[in-house]
Image: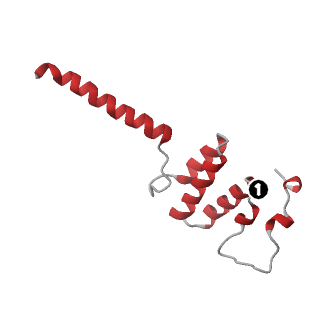
């Protein structure tokens, strides 16, 4: 049994390393309140993963519901050309025209 201790230790260490690598690569959890969702959203955006970025910005508004989170979410929707979703839910204006009728990507300033 004594000779197996190093083998068991290395096996256990390998399992923890594998779990860490999988969590790093696949491990973004939008339901984790401890995660920096804004940072993940920016990272996804930089990698061109727009839908993942949207998911992370939605999580950011859930766990840190302040004006900046909702602004970031609105910008994300605009970049995805989902203009009607970009309207802030806290300011319902049923008489206002849809954003898609007043904003077009060709008139946007980058």
Is residue 33 left or right of 62 when viewed as pictured?
left
- Residue under the point 27% across and 27% down: 11
Location of mark 1 (residue)? 81
The residue at the point 64 percent across, 44 percent down is 49
- Splitting the image into 4 quarters, where does residue 86 fall? bottom right
Q: Quadrant of the N terminus?
A: top left
Determine crowd level at label 1: few under 14, some 14-19, many 20+ residues with C-alpha closer than 10 A. Answer: some
* Image point (74%, 66%), residue name: 84
* Residue situated furthest right in the rendering: 107
Residue 46 drawn at (x, y percent):
66, 42
Which residue sits at x=64%, y=50%? Answer: 51
- Is 95 rendered above or below residue 41? below
22 w.r.t. 110: above or below = above
**Residue placed furthest toward the left:** 1
Image colouring: secondary structure
Indicate left or right for 109 with 7 as reference: right
| x then y, percent, for residue 89 | 66, 72
């Amino acid at each position: 049994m004594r000779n197996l201790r190093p083998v068991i230790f290395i096996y256990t260490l390998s399992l923890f390393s594998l779990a860490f690598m999988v969590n790093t690569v696949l491990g973004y959890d939008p339901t984790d309140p401890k995660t920096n969702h804004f940072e993940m959203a920016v990272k996804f955006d930089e990698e061109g993963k727009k839908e993942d970025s949207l998911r992370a910005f939605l999580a950011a508004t859930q766990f840190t519901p302040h004006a900046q989170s909702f602004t970031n979410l609105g910008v994300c929707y605009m970049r995805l050309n989902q203009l009607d979703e970009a309207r802030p839910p806290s300011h319902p204006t049923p008489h206002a025209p849809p954003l898609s009728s007043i904003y077009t990507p060709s008139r946007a300033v980058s």
